[in-house]
Image (cartoon, grey):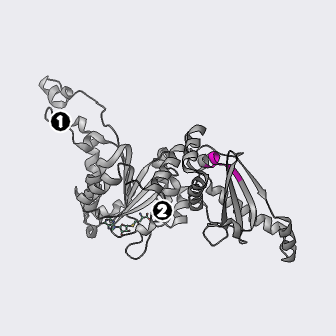
Amino acid sequence: MVDVRTDLIQRLIRAGTGSDEEIAVLLDDVGLPRFVQALTEEIVFRCPEPANTMPIDVALEVTYGKESHTSVLRVAQGAAVTVVEEESATVWSKIGISAADLLRRLFGPADSRRTGDFHNSFVPAPEDRAQLQAMYFKLDTLMRAAAQATHTVMSGCSARCGELGNLSIRYGSDKWASFHWYTPHYERHFAPYRDRPVRVLEIGIGGYEDDLGGPSLKMWKRYFHRGLIFGLDLYDKSALNETRLTALTGDQGDPGALVAMAEEHGPFDIIIDDGSHMNDHVHTSFRALFPYVRTGGLYVVEDLQTAYFSDFGGSSGGVAEPHTSIGLLKALLDDVHFQEHATEDGAEPNLTQSTVTGLHVYHNIAFVEKGVNGEDTLPAWMHADAWEALGAK
Ligand SMILES: C[S@@+](CC[C@H](N)C(=O)[O-])C[C@H]1O[C@@H](n2cnc3c(N)ncnc32)[C@H](O)[C@@H]1O
């Protein structure tokens, strides 16, 4: 069964890089109000924390030919940005933009700076000016608050999201400045995927049993502005579900459940294992899910330190054994070089030998690249045995 919300958001994502004609086809099909409603939901999610202490209602007027549809967003420090009914709003700032330009701001490429595609006005109605004086507001205070609120909404109308470390702090993930310092590594390896309509799966949603969690899923949703984000956790966190974010329930130690989940929701461009960090779970999840990483994708394993923690099933000495997460990575390093192994003639490479094309290991985190591991350094007959048979030293 097609999930109507997911279907619409996927069409919007695709149209974000499409032509004017493709956007018009979509608009004619879904209608401007539904189009604006879906984009407004996305803007509300993307807005940074408001700076204005005085609450401000910002109107977003979206036009398509002669048609227009307005959403009003209430912006105030200390509260989430919300959509309010136009009739009950006091609008101090109005943003006007065409439907196509707004769509491209949200789902077009993040690296193209957008400016000059909207107009903005500070709009106190004459009776409001009188009201202003009566309430002893200073006009400059109000204008400053309106400017701050407009900035918040315009930041929400953007694919750009700032540095990943800031997003981690904003949403409360421990991927930066909380014992872990992972976000620069993520930025380095995830940058090529940012503008793509990726499917990302993270094992481990956070928050444990009683707390809903989900900080890193929100961080990925903001970072991958065209992405569909999936989380998998032992506990039911489906209350987190919203557009572009799906929380699934399952045990990463159960290969059958992982395969069933991946058959339904995969393949994925990126999988991140930030779950139990039990060494056997890391192996089980990798073996079950690596086949569901797309060619050209990445599999990330966090918190490799548990390879040395015996209570996580790790090695207790300084050398990580094969059953640990580090042991898995060491084996993959051999797999990357399978062409150089002196194997029996005709032996077929296994999945990791034929598809692991790169390994990047940093303190406590590793990125495994999937592709076609097909570079041939030497023909098989030039292996050591063959040279020996030819009498070479
Ligand atoms: C470290 S937290 C994840 C933090 C989150 N990824 C972040 O960066 O904010 C680990 C999560 O893994 C989940 N978890 C523990 N054991 C699991 C298992 N066997 N299968 C799936 N999830 C598990 C926990 O419930 C917890 O929510």
The kind of residue tagged 2 is Glu
| Mark 1 element type | loop
Q: Residues within 10 Å of mark 1 (few under 14, many from 20)?
A: few
Crowding near pointer 2: few (<14 within 10 Å), some, many (20+)? Answer: few
Residue 30: x, y in percent?
55, 50
Which residue is located at x 74 percent, y 68 percent? 90
Judge whether residue 310 can be spotted in this image: yes
Residue ID for mark 1: 342
Q: Which residues are magenta?
A: 96-102
Count of marks overlaid on the render: 2
- In the displayed orientation, state which residue is furthest to the top: 390
195 or 30, which lies in front? 30
Camera-near label (2 vs 1) is: 2
In 3D space, how far apart are the residues under numbered discs 2 and 1 (Cα atoms)? 52 Å
In the image, residue 188 above or below residue 363? above
Report the side of 313 relative to 204 (left or right).
Answer: left
Ligand 1, by image quadrant, is bottom left
Q: Is residue 197 above or below residue 38?
A: above
Q: Residue at x 55, y 48 (%)?
A: 107
- Residue 274 horizontal/vertical position (percent): 37, 61
Amino acid type assigned to the residue bearing label 1 in the image: Ala
Does residue 71 show up magenta in the picture? no
Find residue 283 and report its image quarter.
bottom left
- Depth order, front residue of 196/333: 196
Earlier sequence position, callout 2 versus callout 1: 2
From what the image shows, is residue 330 above or below residue 384? below
The residue at which mark 2 appears reads as: 242
